[in-house]
Amino acid sequence: MVAGVAVGLAGVVGLHGVIPNSPGRAGSLVESILPWSGAVVLLLFVVALVRRSGVGLAALLLPVGVWVQSFGGLLLPPPDVGSRELVVVQHNVSDENPDPAGTARALVAARGDFLALQEVVVPALAVYEDVLGADYPHHVVHGTVGLWSKYPIAEQQLVDIRPRAFEAGWSRGLRAVVRTPYGDVAAYVAHLPSVRVGAGGLTSSPRDESARMLGDIVRGEKVRNVILMGDLNSTVDDRGLRPLTSQLNVAERGFAFSYPAALPLARIDQVLARSAGVSHIRTLPATGSDHLPVAARLTLDPLPPSGRPAP
């Protein structure tokens, strides 16, 4: 029994892309929990020991190898600091946060270059502006998403990622061009629609539609360096985010499970980048939100010899 389950588990982890997404978006659901396949391996290991199954123990080498291939790099320690490095903090601060001032102070303590926030609602917005203003003098807010920056913001605009079925007032995306010491960065902040898991499986069509819209916008971005920060309501393994992960770099090290804050099971708060490597991502201490903040270190690619961005 253990051997059969081990082989099947290895197949799921290694070949998850062939799992059909219907009915119930089964493929996306499996991909959202793939890292936890390691816990299943540990459980099978205990069962094999109790049953003294040599065949089962030997078979477990297969899913262990596949899991290490897929996720082992995330366990490595943070790399050395690069010369063209930015630190960004991403946090869904929650529209029901009872202590926005305390949350803002906690984010300042992380000492990021950018802060990307979602569910920024009135009257909490005034609190964030007041507490963050001294350390982050440049900021922009559209709808319920905001960006605070230590560096000047040269351009800013609303990004329309509203699914067709959603009401006109739904606004959860922005773009800003930030003048960093390493050149201009197109910084995107987004909050994709929520998903639900029920008897019929995963309900993710609006999120997937929003991700496709955002992917098309990012694909047309003319600024060389792009950083996308947001609550994407999905893990980077989920095919629902493929319009983004197919063109942007994901975190190389760190699991940083961010949701739910009380018992983090998945990282749905993401930092993705183009012309930059997301060298490490980690969670920060809990705030008044139901999400944990995450902080990511990014190393920007060197400019071409001309000093100008590549075409």
Image (cartoon, rainbow, N blue to C red):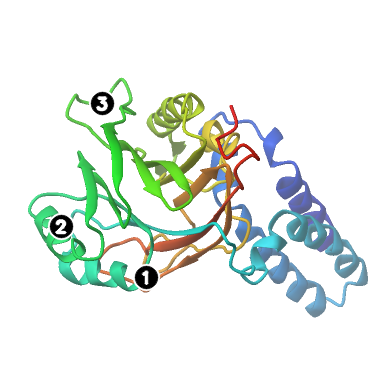
Q: Quadrant of residue 19?
A: top right
* Residue at position x 60%, y 43% in the image: 303
The residue positioned 69% from the left and 41% from the top of the image is 16
Residue 213 to residue 77: above or below = above
Residue 129's disc is 2
Check disc 3 and give the amino acid type.
Phe
Residue 144 visible, this orientation? no
What amino acid is labelled 2 in the image? Glu
Amino acid type, label 1: Ala
Percent position (x, y) of residue 149? 31, 54
Q: From the image, which quarter does the N terminus lie in?
A: bottom right
Instruction: Find the distance from the CA under tag 1 to the CA under tag 3.
Output: 35 Å
In which quarter of the view is residue 114 placed? bottom left
Q: Earlier in the sequence, mark 1 or mark 2?
A: 1
Numbered disc 2: secondary structure: helix
Q: CA distance from mark 1 to mark 2?
A: 17 Å
What residue would you read off at disc 1? 110
> Nearest the camera: 58 or 70?
70
In the rendered image, which residue does mark 3 sit on?
166
Left or right, 168 with respect to 23, comes to: left
Q: Quadrant of the C terminus?
A: top right
Toward the viewer: 304 or 226? 304
Q: Nearer the viewer, residue 57 or 289?
A: 289
Query: What is the x, y in percent for residue 69?
Result: 77, 56
Q: Secondary structure at mark 1?
A: loop
Q: Which mark is residue 200?
A: none
Q: Is residue 137 left or right of residue 159?
A: left
Tag 2 near tag 3, CB within 8 Å: no
Instruction: Give the mark nearer the N terminus: 1 vs 3.
Output: 1
Q: Residues within 10 Å of mark 1 (few under 14, many from 20)?
A: some
Can you give x and y, in whole percent of width and height, for residue 70 in the image? 72, 54
